[in-house]
Amino acid sequence: CFVESPSSALFVSDDGGLTWEARDKSQWMVWRPFYFANLIIDPKNPDRLFKTDGALIVSEDAGKSFAVVGGFQGAHGDVHDVWIDSTNPQTVFAGDDGGMWYSYNGGSKWWKGNNLPVSQFYHVSLDDNDPYRVYGGLQDNSSWVGQSEYPGGITDHQWENMYNGDGFWMFPDPADSDYIYAEYQGGEIARINRRTHEARNIKPRPNYNEKLRFNWNTPIALSPNEKGTIYVGAQFLFRSRDHGQTWERISPDLTTNDPQKQKQEQSGGVTIDNSSAEMHTTIYSISESPKDESLIWVGTDDGNLQLTRDGGRTWTKVIGNIPGLPKNSWVSWVQASDFDAGTAYAAFDRHTFGDMAPYVFRTTDYGKTWTSLVTPQESKGVRGYAHVVKEDVIKPNLLFVGSEFGLFVSIDGGKSWAQFKGNHFPAVAVRDLAIQPRENDLVLATHGRGIWIVDDITPLRALTPDLLTQEVAFVSARPVQQRIEGSGGWANGDAAFVGDNPPEAAVITYYQRSRHLFGKLKLEILDESGRVLDELPASKRPGLNRVTWPMRAKPPRVPPAAQIAFAGTRGPRLVPGVYTVRLTKAGKVSETKLTVGLDRRAKFSEADRKAQFDAAMQVRALFGEESGLMDRILGLRKALAQGGAALSEGDPLHKNISDFDGKVDAVRKKIVATTEGGAITGEERLREHTDQLYGAILSYEGKPGGYQMAYIDSLKRELADVTKDFEQLLAQDLPALNESLKTKGQQPIPPPPAKVAVDDTAGGSADGSARP
């Protein structure tokens, strides 16, 4: 067993605990016992045991000596648990602050488990890039920036580590896109060049004989009014207007400054431990009003909430104005309103007092009075202590609360709340959230399930009391773009997590007051002429429903062959324009318009896009004509096989039928590849050339090249030549064969029909509403 004492050590008993012998006292045995004190014994060898610590150590001699086999050596470090396979003790799994690690040789080598989406984000911010990037700090795993979408999906490779330590707040510098602000524990803030990764520490420093108290999760805030202005909080509020080159102290001590809560160097019980996580009486939340740069809110971890309306010259404590709030409640969040200078929101966390209930309040008069939005007495369905409260950037009555158990949404200014469960969003701690104003996406920083993006919260803004009384209604959403289909990504296997991209489709949102139970629920897409293009599978669930429409015609009908026509598996994407969505429920019809536009990044015009679509449809039609001809050929060969089966092999007519079938098959071999043995034979015929051209035109949605249009004409001419050869067989050889059959009393071979219909409709599917 491990014993924590003034002389901590590993103790071993060989007589059931009657006597004990002190053995190892090395650093990785005794370091931080409150955090690391786990011993794991090999189920097949009692002399072999692992001890978890900053590094993972193992003993092969019953604890007399230890060697480092993991943690800071070959893995992340801060190891908390180990599992040993009882059937093969060389297989060892370890869990540390960096995730899950696997060893198959007893710990000499380690493999990282990269398929577990369990990262612990503290905070999140976004930029205005297209696609936008996501910034955030991870518990004991640095500060990262990643893509919100990427061809092939979002893997670890689309995330870049920008700073060290435990990551917390992280922002792109709005005054210079080449720079990022980030920090690690205890206020170690830096300004980082995103290209060179040069990091300049800009943490404010104390005056002579002074100690600054920075929280483990020191707050950083950017001014919404003045680019380049940044705030950081200790017990004082600091402001820099020159990217951290200089700092001005713009407040007195805003905490309670209780000396009984400042004994960090004496904390930890038997073993002193002071990592800055123990720092108390500190500023924890900062918010400058977007309506007034002189109005700044500050909340502390020891229960103070203060406000300045003159840029820091004077401060007013308003915590005592909040009704029913217990004393010393940790201010987990304070947020100035985007719409009104006198309005602000505050959330409080009392779980360290054993109180797991949420506390959320709003003021509309600069903190003089407060209205409770969520309290233990009126939780309104909100579960878990509150980490963050934010107001929507468009609709002030749309509020979001992130709690220890999930995301909660109010569409009526906090009178009622509902838990967000879209796409099976888990009951996980939501520590922060951000809204991307251009895309209207809600991005969640969860402490345990990574970053989640709720694509387009426009429908939440559209929910009104009147709409909620309707049996069914379409709900407005952001404008639809036909996003460029870029190349990228790769096969990652099951050992890597790949985050979802937004759907490459138009998202249609509708509301149902109750679940649809009887009859068909039909959702259709119509073009401007009123022609039905597609019927989509409609969700019958109550509440908000999202269905995706891929905006594509159906794939072409491709002639059967020995090779795969890869491009021919997709239909052309329909042109931008105004479409009608029609929902039929129990005989009642509802309609809405759906405007589809180009990707805002596109370098081509809508006229170019129309030219591409027309070209693709020409090739698609060419596939159809090839298939029609192939149908006739295959139909004729089937009839020939049946006619030949009625004759003995020695009959001269049997040979005549076989010879004619050979001529027909020779025509088939001009259309398609026929060499058997694999999907890729290298054999190219008319169908394969058509597929290559079709893929080239689909790959770029701008105007096709003149050479591509010329090649369409060439392929049409080649098909006309092949069709002529087939028609000649029908006109000359088939009548002669049928005359011979008649003289023998056999049924003539009927000529195949001339045309085959082609289906031009499109296709769609149901879709979720959030993505990890």
Image (spheres, rainbow, N blue to C red):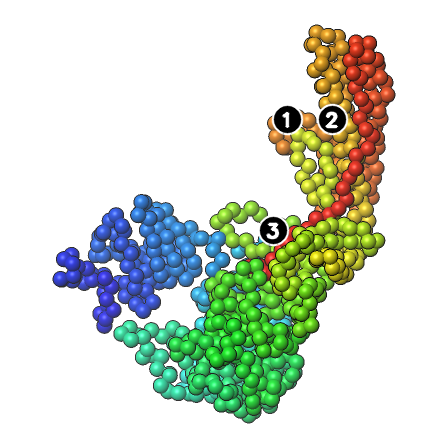
Residue 183 image point, x, y percent = 50, 71
Which comes before the other along the chain, label 3 or label 1? 3
Secondary structure under tag 2 reads helix
Q: Position of residue 432 (x, y in %)?
A: 53, 71
Mark 3, residue position = 152
Q: Residue at x 22, y 52 (%)?
A: 47
Compare residues 486 and 725 and report the one nearer the observer. 725
Q: Quadrant of the N terminus?
A: bottom left
**Other-residue count near label 3 (Cα within 10 Å), few / some / many at <14 / 14–19 / ≥20:** some
Whether residue 199 can be seen here: no
* Residue placed furthest toward the right: 731
* Percent x, y of residue 504: 67, 54
Residue at 47% in and 60% down: 118
* Residue for point 14% across, 57% down: 15
As shown in the figure, which amino acid type bears the numbered disc 2?
Leu
Residue 676, label in figure: 1
Between the C-alphas of marks 3 and 1, the distance is 32 Å
Numbered tag placed on residue 634 in the rendering: 2
Indicate which label's residue lies in the foreground, 3 or 1. Answer: 1
Q: Nearer the viewer, mark 1 or mark 2?
A: 2
Does residue 394 appear in the picture of this structure? Answer: yes
